[in-house]
Image (tube, helix red, strand yellow):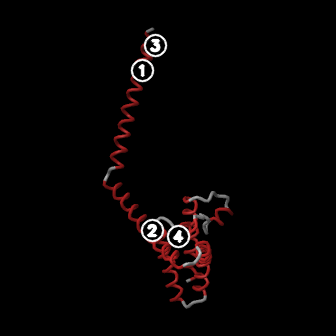
Amino acid sequence: MNINNNIDISMSEIENESRVNKNMVDENKSKILNSPINQTKIKIKDIRKKIKDFIVNKHVEVIKKSGIPLELACLIIKIIHFRLPFDLFLAAYFSPPFIALCLWIFVMGVFSCFLLLNGCVISSIEYKLTGNSLNVMDIFLWMFKKEPNFKNRYMSTIIAAVIYLTLFLVMV
């Protein structure tokens, strides 16, 4: 009987200690989430999303007003989206060094926008036009047997962009 009583006391002490620790974790979590630094990060994320949404919505609005069927407009954008990096690379290769450097700076600017806006604006426009989430990076994800989702597309784009920008700079 005495042993069971000690076990009961120990278990209740453990449960009580567990509740105290859980409350401390919840309190610390709340402090972190409500900290000025975290609130600033949330505001920056919201601003980035608003900027990206504004750019995407304006372009979709212009495309819809143009009268081009949305499927065709999306196809044209996808073709350009896929070809442009290769075409810019070739243009830089056959251009004088100053033009090649200007093209590299342009590509760096596009990549900076990708990072700042948390994804590709062109891909967002394509998706908003037709609802088809097929993406330029899906070809590479398929080759490496990865699931085509936002995280994998984002990371594969960063990897491809670093390789592309490095090769581009070496060529310039």
Q: Residues within 10 Å of mark 1 (few under 14, many from 20)?
A: few
Q: What secondary structure is marked by label 1?
A: helix
Q: Mark 1 and mark 3: span between their CA atoms?
A: 10 Å
Image coordinates of residue 12 in percent, x first then y, are 40, 22
Q: Mark 2 and mark 4: span between their CA atoms?
A: 10 Å
Residue 122, relative to residue 172: is it above or below? above
Amino acid type, label 2: Lys
- In the figure, is residue 170 to the left or right of 117? right
Which residue is tagged 1?
A: 10
- Mark sitting earlier along the chain (1/2): 1
* Numbered label attached to residue 125: 4
Amino acid type, label 3: Asn
Image coordinates of residue 79 in percent, x first then y, are 62, 76
- Mark sitting earlier along the chain (1/4): 1
Q: Mark 4 and mark 3: span between their CA atoms?
A: 67 Å
Which residue is tagged 2?
A: 52
Residue 17 appearing in the image: yes
Image coordinates of residue 41 in percent, x first then y, are 37, 58
Image coordinates of residue 115 in percent, x first then y, are 47, 67
Quadrant for the C terminus, please.
bottom right
Amino acid type, label 4: Ile
Quadrant for the N terminus, please.
top left
Q: Mark 3 and mark 2: span between their CA atoms?
A: 64 Å
Which residue is tagged 3?
A: 4
Q: Mark 1 and mark 4: span between their CA atoms?
A: 61 Å
Q: What secondary structure is marked by label 3?
A: helix
